[in-house]
Image: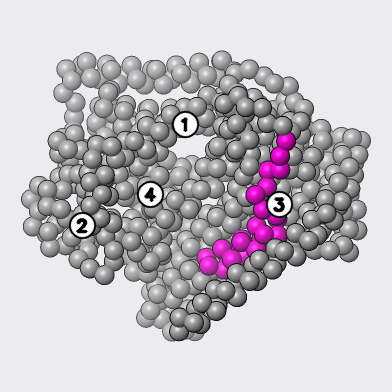
Amino acid sequence: MAVTNKKSSFDLLSIPIIKKFIKSKWYPGIFQWTVLLVFSIIVFELVAGTVNPHRNFGTTMTWVLWWPIIPILFIALGRFWCAICPFGKLSDIIRKMVGSERPMPKFLRKYGIWLIDLFFIAITYSDHVWGIVESPRGSGYLLLLLVTMVVATSVFYERRTFCKTLCFLGGLAGNYSRSGALQLRGTADICRTCKTQSCFKGSEKAEGCPMFQFVRTMDSSAECNICGNCVKNCPNESIKLNLRVPTKELWSLKNPKLEHASLAAVIMGIVFVQNITMLEIWGQILETISFVTGTSNYVVNFTIAFIISMALPILLLLGAAKLATILGMPNTIKKNFILFGYAFIPLDLAGHLGHNLFHIITEGKAIWYNSLAFIGQEVTSGDLSLATTPTVQMLQYIIITIGFIGSSYTAYKMGKQATFKAMLPYYGLMLVLGIINIYLFSLPMSHRV
Amino acid sequence: MKHWKFALIAAGWFLFFSYNTAVLAHEGEEQEAETYLKDFSTNEHEHSDTEEQVTDSHDSHEIEDSTHDSEDSREHDSHETEASTNHNHSNQEHSESTIKEESHDDSGSHDQGGGHGAFTGEETGPNYIVLSSIASVNAGFLLIGIWNRVRKGGNYHGGNK
Protein backbone atom coordinates (compact mmCIF):
# COMPACT_ATOMS: atom_id res chain seq x y z
CA MET A 1 0.00 0.00 0.00
CA ALA A 2 1.68 3.17 -1.21
CA VAL A 3 -1.01 5.64 -0.36
CA THR A 4 -0.62 8.17 2.40
CA ASN A 5 -2.60 9.11 5.42
CA LYS A 6 -0.30 11.77 6.76
CA LYS A 7 -2.11 14.93 7.73
CA SER A 8 0.95 17.13 8.01
CA SER A 9 1.28 18.08 4.32
CA PHE A 10 -1.12 20.55 2.81
CA ASP A 11 -3.81 19.11 0.54
CA LEU A 12 -4.66 21.44 -2.34
CA LEU A 13 -7.94 19.59 -2.83
CA SER A 14 -9.03 20.83 0.59
CA ILE A 15 -9.52 24.20 -1.10
CA PRO A 16 -13.08 23.95 -2.46
CA ILE A 17 -12.55 26.04 -5.57
CA ILE A 18 -9.53 23.94 -6.66
CA LYS A 19 -11.34 20.69 -6.02
CA LYS A 20 -14.41 21.92 -7.90
CA PHE A 21 -12.27 23.05 -10.84
CA ILE A 22 -10.32 19.77 -11.06
CA LYS A 23 -13.55 17.79 -10.87
CA SER A 24 -15.19 19.91 -13.56
CA LYS A 25 -15.09 19.10 -17.27
CA TRP A 26 -13.04 22.26 -17.80
CA TYR A 27 -9.97 20.67 -16.26
CA PRO A 28 -7.57 19.95 -17.91
CA GLY A 29 -9.45 20.55 -21.19
CA ILE A 30 -9.26 24.32 -21.07
CA PHE A 31 -5.47 24.15 -20.84
CA GLN A 32 -5.20 21.31 -23.35
CA TRP A 33 -7.15 23.08 -26.09
CA THR A 34 -5.27 26.34 -25.52
CA VAL A 35 -1.90 24.58 -25.71
CA LEU A 36 -3.03 22.58 -28.75
CA LEU A 37 -4.03 25.79 -30.53
CA VAL A 38 -0.69 27.45 -29.75
CA PHE A 39 1.15 24.26 -30.74
CA SER A 40 -0.62 24.22 -34.13
CA ILE A 41 0.39 27.82 -34.77
CA ILE A 42 3.97 27.05 -33.73
CA VAL A 43 4.21 24.03 -36.04
CA PHE A 44 2.73 26.04 -38.90
CA GLU A 45 5.25 28.82 -38.33
CA LEU A 46 8.13 26.35 -38.12
CA VAL A 47 7.34 24.54 -41.35
CA ALA A 48 5.93 27.45 -43.35
CA GLY A 49 7.22 30.65 -41.72
CA THR A 50 10.52 32.41 -42.11
CA VAL A 51 13.66 30.27 -42.10
CA ASN A 52 15.41 32.94 -40.05
CA PRO A 53 15.52 31.42 -36.54
CA HIS A 54 15.89 34.86 -34.96
CA ARG A 55 12.59 35.95 -36.47
CA ASN A 56 10.63 32.72 -36.41
CA PHE A 57 7.81 32.77 -33.87
CA GLY A 58 7.85 28.97 -33.60
CA THR A 59 11.58 28.75 -32.87
CA THR A 60 11.36 31.42 -30.20
CA MET A 61 8.32 29.96 -28.51
CA THR A 62 9.76 26.43 -28.56
CA TRP A 63 13.40 26.91 -27.68
CA VAL A 64 13.51 30.23 -25.87
CA LEU A 65 10.25 29.97 -23.92
CA TRP A 66 9.00 26.40 -23.65
CA TRP A 67 12.23 24.46 -23.24
CA PRO A 68 13.60 26.68 -20.42
CA ILE A 69 10.34 26.74 -18.44
CA ILE A 70 9.81 22.98 -18.64
CA PRO A 71 12.12 22.12 -15.68
CA ILE A 72 10.48 24.87 -13.61
CA LEU A 73 7.07 23.34 -14.31
CA PHE A 74 8.29 19.91 -13.26
CA ILE A 75 9.66 21.23 -9.97
CA ALA A 76 6.57 23.24 -9.15
CA LEU A 77 3.75 21.09 -10.54
CA GLY A 78 5.17 17.64 -11.22
CA ARG A 79 4.12 16.26 -14.62
CA PHE A 80 1.26 18.70 -15.04
CA TRP A 81 2.73 19.67 -18.41
CA CYS A 82 2.11 16.08 -19.59
CA ALA A 83 -1.59 16.51 -18.78
CA ILE A 84 -1.85 19.53 -21.06
CA CYS A 85 0.79 18.50 -23.63
CA PRO A 86 -0.47 18.81 -27.22
CA PHE A 87 0.86 15.34 -28.06
CA GLY A 88 -1.09 13.88 -25.16
CA LYS A 89 -4.27 15.68 -26.18
CA LEU A 90 -3.79 14.55 -29.78
CA SER A 91 -3.43 11.00 -28.49
CA ASP A 92 -6.69 11.37 -26.51
CA ILE A 93 -8.55 12.66 -29.57
CA ILE A 94 -7.28 9.94 -31.91
CA ARG A 95 -7.99 7.15 -29.43
CA LYS A 96 -11.50 8.45 -28.92
CA MET A 97 -12.15 8.70 -32.66
CA VAL A 98 -10.33 5.77 -34.28
CA GLY A 99 -8.37 3.99 -31.53
CA SER A 100 -8.30 0.20 -31.30
CA GLU A 101 -7.49 0.34 -27.57
CA ARG A 102 -5.29 -2.75 -27.65
CA PRO A 103 -3.17 -3.46 -24.58
CA MET A 104 0.30 -2.01 -24.55
CA PRO A 105 2.79 -4.47 -26.15
CA LYS A 106 4.99 -6.38 -23.71
CA PHE A 107 8.09 -5.11 -25.45
CA LEU A 108 7.13 -1.50 -24.79
CA ARG A 109 6.11 -2.29 -21.22
CA LYS A 110 9.47 -3.90 -20.55
CA TYR A 111 11.83 -1.68 -22.51
CA GLY A 112 9.81 1.53 -22.84
CA ILE A 113 11.91 3.53 -20.42
CA TRP A 114 15.08 2.46 -22.24
CA LEU A 115 13.51 3.62 -25.50
CA ILE A 116 12.69 6.95 -23.86
CA ASP A 117 16.32 7.29 -22.75
CA LEU A 118 17.49 6.35 -26.23
CA PHE A 119 15.18 8.85 -27.97
CA PHE A 120 16.23 11.61 -25.62
CA ILE A 121 19.90 10.98 -26.35
CA ALA A 122 19.21 10.59 -30.09
CA ILE A 123 17.33 13.89 -30.28
CA THR A 124 20.07 15.73 -28.40
CA TYR A 125 22.68 14.17 -30.67
CA SER A 126 20.82 14.93 -33.89
CA ASP A 127 20.26 18.50 -32.75
CA HIS A 128 24.00 19.01 -32.58
CA VAL A 129 24.71 17.21 -35.82
CA TRP A 130 21.89 18.71 -37.92
CA GLY A 131 21.26 21.92 -36.00
CA ILE A 132 17.56 21.31 -35.26
CA VAL A 133 17.26 24.12 -32.74
CA GLU A 134 18.79 26.67 -35.10
CA SER A 135 16.63 25.51 -38.00
CA PRO A 136 12.90 26.31 -37.90
CA ARG A 137 12.24 23.65 -40.54
CA GLY A 138 14.26 21.08 -38.59
CA SER A 139 12.31 21.84 -35.41
CA GLY A 140 9.04 21.63 -37.33
CA TYR A 141 9.87 18.26 -38.85
CA LEU A 142 10.93 16.96 -35.44
CA LEU A 143 7.54 17.94 -34.01
CA LEU A 144 5.75 16.38 -36.98
CA LEU A 145 7.77 13.20 -36.54
CA LEU A 146 6.60 13.08 -32.93
CA VAL A 147 3.03 13.69 -34.10
CA THR A 148 3.38 10.66 -36.40
CA MET A 149 4.58 8.53 -33.49
CA VAL A 150 1.62 9.72 -31.42
CA VAL A 151 -0.83 8.93 -34.23
CA ALA A 152 0.66 5.47 -34.81
CA THR A 153 0.59 4.44 -31.15
CA SER A 154 -2.82 5.98 -30.45
CA VAL A 155 -4.47 4.22 -33.39
CA PHE A 156 -3.43 0.83 -32.02
CA TYR A 157 -2.89 1.02 -28.29
CA GLU A 158 -4.83 2.00 -25.20
CA ARG A 159 -4.36 5.03 -22.97
CA ARG A 160 -1.26 7.15 -23.41
CA THR A 161 1.11 4.43 -24.55
CA PHE A 162 3.23 6.99 -26.38
CA CYS A 163 3.62 9.21 -23.30
CA LYS A 164 4.49 6.30 -21.05
CA THR A 165 6.89 4.43 -23.27
CA LEU A 166 8.11 6.55 -26.16
CA CYS A 167 7.98 10.28 -25.47
CA PHE A 168 11.56 11.55 -25.35
CA LEU A 169 10.60 13.93 -22.58
CA GLY A 170 9.01 11.17 -20.48
CA GLY A 171 12.17 10.05 -18.71
CA LEU A 172 13.22 13.60 -17.99
CA ALA A 173 9.72 14.50 -16.82
CA GLY A 174 9.57 11.43 -14.57
CA ASN A 175 12.93 12.03 -12.98
CA TYR A 176 12.36 15.74 -12.42
CA SER A 177 8.86 15.20 -11.06
CA ARG A 178 10.24 12.85 -8.44
CA SER A 179 11.91 15.87 -6.92
CA GLY A 180 8.91 18.12 -7.55
CA ALA A 181 6.87 19.93 -4.92
CA LEU A 182 3.53 18.29 -5.74
CA GLN A 183 2.30 14.76 -5.18
CA LEU A 184 -0.97 13.02 -5.80
CA ARG A 185 -1.77 10.09 -3.53
CA GLY A 186 -4.75 8.21 -2.17
CA THR A 187 -5.81 7.94 1.47
CA ALA A 188 -4.65 4.56 2.78
CA ASP A 189 -7.68 3.69 4.87
CA ILE A 190 -10.13 4.52 2.10
CA CYS A 191 -8.23 2.89 -0.79
CA ARG A 192 -7.77 -0.32 1.24
CA THR A 193 -11.50 -0.96 1.26
CA CYS A 194 -12.26 0.31 -2.25
CA LYS A 195 -14.04 -2.17 -4.52
CA THR A 196 -14.59 -0.02 -7.60
CA GLN A 197 -10.96 0.75 -8.55
CA SER A 198 -12.38 3.39 -10.84
CA CYS A 199 -9.21 5.47 -10.62
CA PHE A 200 -7.59 2.82 -12.82
CA LYS A 201 -10.56 1.41 -14.71
CA GLY A 202 -12.36 4.67 -15.36
CA SER A 203 -16.02 5.55 -15.01
CA GLU A 204 -18.71 7.51 -16.80
CA LYS A 205 -17.07 10.67 -15.42
CA ALA A 206 -13.62 10.20 -16.98
CA GLU A 207 -11.36 7.53 -18.45
CA GLY A 208 -9.04 5.55 -16.18
CA CYS A 209 -5.54 6.75 -15.47
CA PRO A 210 -3.99 7.48 -18.89
CA MET A 211 -0.55 6.64 -17.48
CA PHE A 212 -1.60 3.15 -16.29
CA GLN A 213 -1.27 4.09 -12.61
CA PHE A 214 -3.29 2.61 -9.79
CA VAL A 215 -3.52 5.13 -6.98
CA ARG A 216 -3.62 2.46 -4.29
CA THR A 217 -0.13 1.24 -5.22
CA MET A 218 1.32 4.42 -6.68
CA ASP A 219 4.39 5.44 -4.68
CA SER A 220 5.96 7.92 -7.07
CA SER A 221 5.07 11.12 -8.88
CA ALA A 222 7.19 10.06 -11.84
CA GLU A 223 4.21 8.86 -13.86
CA CYS A 224 1.36 10.93 -12.51
CA ASN A 225 0.25 13.68 -14.90
CA ILE A 226 -2.02 15.41 -12.38
CA CYS A 227 -4.70 15.07 -15.07
CA GLY A 228 -7.37 14.83 -12.37
CA ASN A 229 -9.09 11.75 -13.84
CA CYS A 230 -8.71 9.84 -10.58
CA VAL A 231 -10.09 12.81 -8.65
CA LYS A 232 -13.14 12.79 -10.92
CA ASN A 233 -13.54 9.02 -10.82
CA CYS A 234 -12.98 8.28 -7.13
CA PRO A 235 -16.35 7.74 -5.44
CA ASN A 236 -14.78 7.89 -1.98
CA GLU A 237 -13.00 11.24 -2.07
CA SER A 238 -9.75 9.43 -1.36
CA ILE A 239 -7.40 11.46 -3.54
CA LYS A 240 -5.10 14.06 -2.00
CA LEU A 241 -2.98 16.56 -3.89
CA ASN A 242 -0.29 17.43 -1.41
CA LEU A 243 2.48 19.96 -1.38
CA ARG A 244 5.76 18.43 -0.27
CA VAL A 245 9.39 19.32 0.25
CA PRO A 246 11.15 19.12 -3.14
CA THR A 247 13.33 15.98 -3.48
CA LYS A 248 11.48 14.29 -0.60
CA GLU A 249 10.36 11.37 -2.76
CA LEU A 250 13.99 10.54 -3.51
CA TRP A 251 14.87 10.12 0.15
CA SER A 252 13.18 6.75 0.52
CA LEU A 253 12.83 5.04 -2.85
CA LYS A 254 11.14 1.67 -2.67
CA ASN A 255 11.96 0.30 -6.07
CA PRO A 256 14.92 2.09 -7.64
CA LYS A 257 15.60 1.09 -11.24
CA LEU A 258 18.77 1.02 -13.31
CA GLU A 259 17.18 2.82 -16.27
CA HIS A 260 16.14 5.80 -14.13
CA ALA A 261 19.52 6.03 -12.40
CA SER A 262 21.32 5.78 -15.76
CA LEU A 263 19.11 8.49 -17.24
CA ALA A 264 19.86 10.74 -14.28
CA ALA A 265 23.60 10.32 -14.94
CA VAL A 266 23.14 10.73 -18.70
CA ILE A 267 21.17 13.97 -18.24
CA MET A 268 24.17 15.36 -16.40
CA GLY A 269 26.27 14.45 -19.44
CA ILE A 270 23.74 16.08 -21.76
CA VAL A 271 23.81 19.28 -19.71
CA PHE A 272 27.61 19.22 -20.08
CA VAL A 273 27.31 18.76 -23.85
CA GLN A 274 24.73 21.55 -24.14
CA ASN A 275 26.97 23.87 -22.18
CA ILE A 276 30.29 22.96 -23.75
CA THR A 277 29.09 23.23 -27.36
CA MET A 278 27.93 26.78 -26.70
CA LEU A 279 31.23 27.83 -25.17
CA GLU A 280 34.26 29.47 -26.62
CA ILE A 281 36.42 26.48 -25.66
CA TRP A 282 34.32 24.18 -27.87
CA GLY A 283 36.47 25.06 -30.88
CA GLN A 284 39.60 24.11 -28.97
CA ILE A 285 38.05 20.83 -27.79
CA LEU A 286 37.09 19.95 -31.37
CA GLU A 287 40.59 20.81 -32.47
CA THR A 288 42.08 18.52 -29.82
CA ILE A 289 39.77 15.65 -30.78
CA SER A 290 40.49 16.15 -34.47
CA PHE A 291 44.21 15.95 -33.64
CA VAL A 292 43.62 12.53 -32.04
CA THR A 293 41.21 11.20 -34.68
CA GLY A 294 43.14 12.64 -37.59
CA THR A 295 40.00 13.94 -39.27
CA SER A 296 38.28 17.31 -39.31
CA ASN A 297 34.89 15.68 -39.86
CA TYR A 298 32.59 17.37 -37.36
CA VAL A 299 30.19 14.43 -37.00
CA VAL A 300 33.02 12.06 -36.06
CA ASN A 301 34.63 14.48 -33.62
CA PHE A 302 31.35 15.56 -32.08
CA THR A 303 30.26 11.93 -31.67
CA ILE A 304 33.41 11.21 -29.68
CA ALA A 305 32.87 14.28 -27.48
CA PHE A 306 29.22 13.30 -27.04
CA ILE A 307 30.03 9.72 -26.03
CA ILE A 308 32.68 10.92 -23.55
CA SER A 309 30.21 13.41 -22.01
CA MET A 310 27.54 10.71 -21.64
CA ALA A 311 29.96 8.16 -20.26
CA LEU A 312 31.78 10.46 -17.86
CA PRO A 313 29.01 10.90 -15.23
CA ILE A 314 28.14 7.19 -15.46
CA LEU A 315 31.76 6.18 -14.92
CA LEU A 316 32.16 8.69 -12.09
CA LEU A 317 29.01 7.35 -10.42
CA LEU A 318 30.23 3.79 -10.89
CA GLY A 319 33.59 4.75 -9.40
CA ALA A 320 31.90 6.42 -6.44
CA ALA A 321 29.70 3.34 -5.89
CA LYS A 322 32.74 1.05 -5.93
CA LEU A 323 34.71 3.29 -3.59
CA ALA A 324 31.74 3.62 -1.24
CA THR A 325 31.37 -0.17 -1.13
CA ILE A 326 35.06 -0.51 -0.31
CA LEU A 327 34.65 2.08 2.45
CA GLY A 328 31.87 0.09 4.07
CA MET A 329 28.64 1.04 2.33
CA PRO A 330 26.06 -1.75 2.65
CA ASN A 331 24.75 -3.43 -0.55
CA THR A 332 26.51 -4.33 -3.76
CA ILE A 333 28.15 -1.88 -6.17
CA LYS A 334 25.24 -2.27 -8.61
CA LYS A 335 22.64 -1.54 -5.94
CA ASN A 336 24.59 1.49 -4.76
CA PHE A 337 25.00 2.69 -8.34
CA ILE A 338 21.25 2.45 -8.92
CA LEU A 339 20.17 3.99 -5.63
CA PHE A 340 22.59 6.89 -5.57
CA GLY A 341 22.07 7.59 -9.27
CA TYR A 342 18.80 9.20 -8.21
CA ALA A 343 20.74 11.62 -6.04
CA PHE A 344 21.96 13.22 -9.29
CA ILE A 345 18.46 14.45 -10.08
CA PRO A 346 18.49 17.76 -8.12
CA LEU A 347 21.86 18.62 -9.65
CA ASP A 348 20.55 17.63 -13.10
CA LEU A 349 17.62 19.93 -12.59
CA ALA A 350 19.88 22.74 -11.45
CA GLY A 351 22.22 22.27 -14.42
CA HIS A 352 19.33 22.13 -16.89
CA LEU A 353 17.67 25.13 -15.29
CA GLY A 354 20.90 27.11 -15.09
CA HIS A 355 21.70 26.47 -18.74
CA ASN A 356 18.26 27.46 -19.95
CA LEU A 357 18.06 30.44 -17.63
CA PHE A 358 20.82 31.97 -19.71
CA HIS A 359 18.72 31.63 -22.84
CA ILE A 360 15.44 32.83 -21.41
CA ILE A 361 17.04 35.85 -19.74
CA THR A 362 19.51 36.90 -22.42
CA GLU A 363 17.14 36.19 -25.31
CA GLY A 364 13.83 36.65 -23.49
CA LYS A 365 12.65 39.74 -25.31
CA ALA A 366 12.75 37.80 -28.58
CA ILE A 367 9.54 36.15 -27.35
CA TRP A 368 7.87 39.55 -27.16
CA TYR A 369 9.29 40.91 -30.42
CA ASN A 370 8.51 37.78 -32.43
CA SER A 371 5.03 37.56 -30.94
CA LEU A 372 4.42 41.18 -31.97
CA ALA A 373 5.78 40.47 -35.42
CA PHE A 374 3.55 37.40 -35.64
CA ILE A 375 0.42 39.50 -35.14
CA GLY A 376 1.62 41.97 -37.73
CA GLN A 377 3.12 44.65 -35.51
CA GLU A 378 6.29 46.17 -36.88
CA VAL A 379 9.22 45.80 -34.52
CA THR A 380 11.81 48.50 -35.03
CA SER A 381 14.56 47.76 -32.55
CA GLY A 382 15.31 46.46 -29.12
CA ASP A 383 17.72 44.62 -26.89
CA LEU A 384 16.89 40.95 -26.38
CA SER A 385 18.37 40.69 -22.90
CA LEU A 386 16.31 40.94 -19.75
CA ALA A 387 19.44 41.19 -17.57
CA THR A 388 23.19 41.42 -17.93
CA THR A 389 25.34 38.33 -18.35
CA PRO A 390 26.95 38.67 -14.87
CA THR A 391 23.47 38.76 -13.31
CA VAL A 392 22.56 35.57 -15.13
CA GLN A 393 25.82 33.97 -14.05
CA MET A 394 25.16 34.86 -10.44
CA LEU A 395 21.71 33.28 -10.66
CA GLN A 396 23.26 30.20 -12.27
CA TYR A 397 25.76 29.86 -9.41
CA ILE A 398 22.93 30.15 -6.88
CA ILE A 399 20.88 27.51 -8.70
CA ILE A 400 23.83 25.11 -8.92
CA THR A 401 24.54 25.62 -5.23
CA ILE A 402 20.91 24.78 -4.41
CA GLY A 403 21.16 21.74 -6.70
CA PHE A 404 24.36 20.64 -4.99
CA ILE A 405 22.74 20.97 -1.56
CA GLY A 406 19.67 19.09 -2.83
CA SER A 407 21.76 16.25 -4.28
CA SER A 408 24.04 15.99 -1.25
CA TYR A 409 21.10 16.00 1.15
CA THR A 410 19.33 13.37 -0.96
CA ALA A 411 22.46 11.20 -0.87
CA TYR A 412 22.66 11.76 2.89
CA LYS A 413 19.04 10.65 3.38
CA MET A 414 19.52 7.65 1.08
CA GLY A 415 22.57 6.49 2.96
CA LYS A 416 21.05 6.77 6.40
CA GLN A 417 22.53 3.44 7.49
CA ALA A 418 25.96 4.22 6.11
CA THR A 419 28.85 5.89 7.87
CA PHE A 420 30.08 9.33 6.86
CA LYS A 421 33.27 7.70 5.57
CA ALA A 422 31.29 5.44 3.24
CA MET A 423 29.27 8.41 2.02
CA LEU A 424 32.33 10.54 1.24
CA PRO A 425 32.72 9.34 -2.40
CA TYR A 426 29.17 10.51 -3.16
CA TYR A 427 29.60 13.88 -1.47
CA GLY A 428 32.88 14.28 -3.34
CA LEU A 429 31.23 13.38 -6.63
CA MET A 430 28.41 15.89 -6.10
CA LEU A 431 30.99 18.54 -5.25
CA VAL A 432 33.03 17.80 -8.37
CA LEU A 433 29.93 17.91 -10.59
CA GLY A 434 28.77 21.13 -8.93
CA ILE A 435 32.18 22.74 -9.49
CA ILE A 436 32.28 21.60 -13.14
CA ASN A 437 28.84 23.13 -13.69
CA ILE A 438 29.84 26.40 -12.03
CA TYR A 439 33.04 26.51 -14.05
CA LEU A 440 31.15 25.96 -17.30
CA PHE A 441 28.63 28.66 -16.40
CA SER A 442 31.46 31.06 -15.61
CA LEU A 443 32.59 30.83 -19.23
CA PRO A 444 30.89 32.95 -21.90
CA MET A 445 28.11 31.23 -23.77
CA SER A 446 26.56 31.83 -27.19
CA HIS A 447 22.87 32.35 -27.87
CA ARG A 448 20.15 30.24 -29.39
CA VAL A 449 18.42 32.99 -31.37
CA MET B 1 16.09 32.87 15.22
CA LYS B 2 13.78 34.86 12.95
CA HIS B 3 16.15 37.85 13.17
CA TRP B 4 19.01 35.70 11.99
CA LYS B 5 17.00 34.49 9.01
CA PHE B 6 15.96 38.03 8.15
CA ALA B 7 19.54 39.28 8.42
CA LEU B 8 20.78 36.46 6.19
CA ILE B 9 18.17 37.13 3.51
CA ALA B 10 18.85 40.88 3.65
CA ALA B 11 22.59 40.30 3.34
CA GLY B 12 22.01 38.01 0.37
CA TRP B 13 19.87 40.57 -1.45
CA PHE B 14 22.35 43.33 -0.62
CA LEU B 15 25.21 41.34 -2.14
CA PHE B 16 23.14 40.48 -5.17
CA PHE B 17 22.11 44.05 -5.94
CA SER B 18 25.44 45.62 -5.07
CA TYR B 19 27.08 43.18 -7.48
CA ASN B 20 24.70 44.18 -10.23
CA THR B 21 25.11 47.89 -9.55
CA ALA B 22 28.83 47.48 -10.11
CA VAL B 23 28.15 45.72 -13.37
CA LEU B 24 25.76 48.42 -14.56
CA ALA B 25 28.34 51.09 -13.76
CA HIS B 26 30.59 49.60 -16.45
CA GLU B 27 27.92 49.15 -19.06
CA GLY B 28 29.42 51.79 -21.39
CA GLU B 29 32.76 50.06 -21.34
CA GLU B 30 31.12 46.78 -22.16
CA GLN B 31 29.54 48.35 -25.22
CA GLU B 32 32.93 49.58 -26.44
CA ALA B 33 34.54 46.19 -26.06
CA GLU B 34 31.56 44.59 -27.72
CA THR B 35 31.68 46.98 -30.69
CA TYR B 36 35.40 46.46 -31.06
CA LEU B 37 35.13 42.69 -31.03
CA LYS B 38 32.08 42.70 -33.29
CA ASP B 39 34.00 44.69 -35.90
CA PHE B 40 37.03 42.51 -35.46
CA SER B 41 35.17 39.21 -35.74
CA THR B 42 33.32 40.45 -38.86
CA ASN B 43 36.60 41.41 -40.54
CA GLU B 44 38.14 38.15 -39.48
CA HIS B 45 35.29 36.16 -40.91
CA GLU B 46 35.34 37.92 -44.28
CA HIS B 47 38.56 36.27 -45.31
CA SER B 48 37.99 32.86 -43.78
CA ASP B 49 36.95 29.80 -45.70
CA THR B 50 35.07 26.75 -44.48
CA GLU B 51 38.08 24.50 -44.08
CA GLU B 52 39.94 26.98 -41.93
CA GLN B 53 37.14 27.78 -39.57
CA VAL B 54 38.41 25.87 -36.58
CA THR B 55 41.83 27.44 -36.99
CA ASP B 56 40.27 30.86 -37.46
CA SER B 57 38.27 30.63 -34.30
CA HIS B 58 41.37 29.55 -32.47
CA ASP B 59 43.34 32.49 -33.85
CA SER B 60 40.67 34.95 -32.96
CA HIS B 61 40.60 33.41 -29.51
CA GLU B 62 44.29 34.22 -29.11
CA ILE B 63 43.71 37.79 -30.13
CA GLU B 64 40.68 37.90 -27.94
CA ASP B 65 42.84 36.70 -25.08
CA SER B 66 44.77 39.94 -25.31
CA THR B 67 41.74 41.75 -23.97
CA HIS B 68 41.83 39.70 -20.78
CA ASP B 69 43.65 42.45 -18.98
CA SER B 70 40.52 44.53 -19.06
CA GLU B 71 37.89 44.42 -16.36
CA ASP B 72 35.86 41.30 -15.65
CA SER B 73 32.62 42.62 -16.99
CA ARG B 74 34.22 43.60 -20.25
CA GLU B 75 35.90 40.24 -20.44
CA HIS B 76 32.62 38.39 -20.10
CA ASP B 77 30.96 40.24 -22.91
CA SER B 78 33.90 40.04 -25.24
CA HIS B 79 34.04 36.31 -24.66
CA GLU B 80 30.36 36.14 -25.34
CA THR B 81 30.77 37.74 -28.76
CA GLU B 82 33.52 35.33 -29.55
CA ALA B 83 31.57 32.35 -28.31
CA SER B 84 28.71 33.31 -30.55
CA THR B 85 31.07 33.49 -33.49
CA ASN B 86 32.44 30.04 -32.76
CA HIS B 87 29.00 28.54 -32.52
CA ASN B 88 27.92 30.00 -35.80
CA HIS B 89 31.07 28.70 -37.40
CA SER B 90 30.21 25.19 -36.29
CA ASN B 91 26.71 25.42 -37.63
CA GLN B 92 27.88 26.78 -40.95
CA GLU B 93 30.43 24.11 -41.33
CA HIS B 94 28.27 21.18 -40.47
CA SER B 95 24.70 22.03 -41.28
CA GLU B 96 23.29 20.71 -44.51
CA SER B 97 21.12 23.77 -44.69
CA THR B 98 21.71 26.34 -47.39
CA ILE B 99 21.51 29.12 -44.85
CA LYS B 100 24.68 31.13 -44.52
CA GLU B 101 25.42 33.58 -41.80
CA GLU B 102 27.93 36.11 -42.95
CA SER B 103 28.24 38.40 -40.00
CA HIS B 104 27.93 37.83 -36.28
CA ASP B 105 26.15 40.72 -34.74
CA ASP B 106 25.99 40.07 -31.05
CA SER B 107 24.73 43.45 -30.00
CA GLY B 108 21.42 42.01 -28.95
CA SER B 109 19.54 44.23 -31.33
CA HIS B 110 16.40 42.85 -32.88
CA ASP B 111 16.21 45.07 -35.94
CA GLN B 112 17.78 44.46 -39.35
CA GLY B 113 17.22 40.73 -39.28
CA GLY B 114 17.76 40.92 -35.58
CA GLY B 115 18.55 38.63 -32.71
CA HIS B 116 22.01 37.57 -31.72
CA GLY B 117 23.21 36.82 -35.22
CA ALA B 118 22.38 38.62 -38.45
CA PHE B 119 20.64 36.49 -41.03
CA THR B 120 21.35 36.93 -44.70
CA GLY B 121 20.18 33.54 -46.00
CA GLU B 122 17.54 33.03 -48.62
CA GLU B 123 13.95 32.67 -47.54
CA THR B 124 12.45 29.43 -48.76
CA GLY B 125 8.86 28.29 -48.78
CA PRO B 126 7.50 25.17 -47.11
CA ASN B 127 8.86 21.88 -48.40
CA TYR B 128 5.65 20.33 -49.68
CA ILE B 129 7.30 17.01 -50.49
CA VAL B 130 8.33 16.46 -46.87
CA LEU B 131 5.04 17.77 -45.51
CA SER B 132 2.90 15.67 -47.84
CA SER B 133 4.98 12.57 -47.01
CA ILE B 134 4.38 13.08 -43.30
CA ALA B 135 0.70 13.82 -43.93
CA SER B 136 0.37 10.63 -46.02
CA VAL B 137 1.92 8.45 -43.32
CA ASN B 138 -0.39 9.95 -40.69
CA ALA B 139 -3.42 9.60 -42.95
CA GLY B 140 -2.44 5.97 -43.51
CA PHE B 141 -2.44 5.29 -39.77
CA LEU B 142 -5.77 7.05 -39.36
CA LEU B 143 -7.26 4.95 -42.18
CA ILE B 144 -6.05 1.80 -40.41
CA GLY B 145 -7.78 3.06 -37.28
CA ILE B 146 -11.01 3.70 -39.16
CA TRP B 147 -10.77 0.29 -40.81
CA ASN B 148 -10.31 -1.37 -37.39
CA ARG B 149 -13.37 0.43 -36.08
CA VAL B 150 -15.48 -0.49 -39.11
CA ARG B 151 -14.34 -4.12 -38.99
CA LYS B 152 -15.23 -4.45 -35.32
CA GLY B 153 -18.49 -2.58 -35.75
CA GLY B 154 -17.48 0.10 -33.28
CA ASN B 155 -16.93 -2.40 -30.44
CA TYR B 156 -13.29 -1.94 -29.79
CA HIS B 157 -11.20 -3.78 -27.24
CA GLY B 158 -10.60 -2.40 -23.77
CA GLY B 159 -12.87 -1.53 -20.89
CA ASN B 160 -11.29 1.85 -20.33
CA LYS B 161 -13.75 4.57 -21.14
* Residue A367, horizontal then vertical, whole percent: 59, 38
Which tag, 1 or 4, sits closer to the chain's start?
1
Q: Of discs 1 and 3, which sits in the foreground?
A: 1
Chain to which mark 3 belongs:
A
Please tell me whether residue A392 belongs to the stretch shown in magenta.
yes
Q: Which residue is mark 3?
A: A445
Q: Are marks 2 and 1 on the same chain?
A: yes
Q: Which residue is mark 2?
A: A186
Q: Amino acid at mark 3?
A: Met
Q: Which residue is mark 4?
A: A79
Q: Residue at x 89, y 64 (%)?
A: B69
- Left or right: A443 as drawn, with respect to A325: right
Applied colour scheme:
one colour
Q: Amino acid at mark 2?
A: Gly
| Secondary element at image label 4 | loop
Which tag, 4 or 3, sits closer to the chain's start?
4
Which tag, 2 or 3, sits closer to the chain's start?
2
Q: CA distance from mark 2 to mark 1?
A: 33 Å
- Left or right: B84 as drawn, with respect to B4: right
Q: CA distance from mark 4 to mark 3?
A: 30 Å
- In the rendered image, the quadrant that contains the N terminus of chain A is bottom left
**Mark 1 near mark 4, Cβ–Cβ under 8 Å?**
no
Q: Are marks 4 and 3 on the same chain?
A: yes
Q: Residue at x 46, y 42 (%)?
A: A168
Chain to which mark 2 belongs:
A
Q: Amino acid at mark 4?
A: Arg
| Secondary element at image label 2 | loop
Q: Which residue is mark 1?
A: A39
- In the rendered image, the quadrant that contains the C terminus of chain A is top right
